[in-house]
Amino acid sequence: MKYLCLGYLYPEKMDALPNDEKESILQECGSHLKGFYETNQVMLDAGLDAEVKSLKRVNGKVKVIDGPFIETKELIGSAILIEARDMEEAIEIASKHPSIQIEAGEDLGWAIEIRPIHYFEMIDQK
């Protein structure tokens, strides 16, 4: 089964850190990513930009809304697609991600949400 993991962060917390501290955190992330990828169950790991557009159908027309549709201070910063037997294994795999492994992630409010995927179609882009 496939699972979508959404990585959350508070960008203002990371932005408030001195550059050398940010660099140190990112270097620590790199070593944990290696182990995360070596599970061979990570199909996609994508960092997401802060720019968000939400689409909604209103009165028969497409309405474009700037910013996150849901008001929150947390930002979805990454999307990860993994393959796992069940939710327990998905949790085990996602827990290897740097946002959960490194101590700074706790102070920065990093978190991962795991959702089972009920429909998944790979579209051939020839």
Image (cartoon, rainbow, N blue to C red):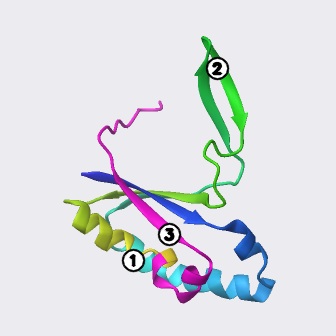
What residue does disc 3 label? 111
Badge 2, how many Cα within 10 Å: few under 14, some, many 20+?
few
- State the residue in front, 93 or 35: 93
Q: Please tell me which of labels 3 and 1 falls first in the chain.
A: 1
Tell me which segment is drawn in magenta: 100-126
Residue kind at label 2, given as amino acid type:
Val
Query: Residue 92, located in which quarter of the rendered image?
Result: bottom left
- Residue positioned 25% across, 61% down in the render: 87
Badge 1, how many Cα within 10 Å: few under 14, some, many 20+?
some
x, y percentage for residue 117?
A: 32, 46
- Residue positioned 23% across, 67% down in the render: 88
Q: In the image, 97: left or right of 72? A: left
Residue kind at label 3, given as amino acid type:
Ala
Q: Residue furthest top?
A: 60
Query: Residue 30, located in which quarter of the rendered image?
Result: bottom right
- Residue positioned 30% across, 51% down in the render: 2
What's the distance in space between the residues labelled 3 and 1, CA to CA? Answer: 12 Å
User: Residue 62 has which mark?
Assistant: 2
Query: Which SS class for mark 1?
Result: loop
Residue kind at label 1, given as amino acid type:
Lys
Frontmost of labels 1 and 2 is: 2
What residue does disc 1 label? 96
Badge 3, how many Cα within 10 Å: few under 14, some, many 20+?
many
- Residue positioned 53% across, 88% down in the render: 103
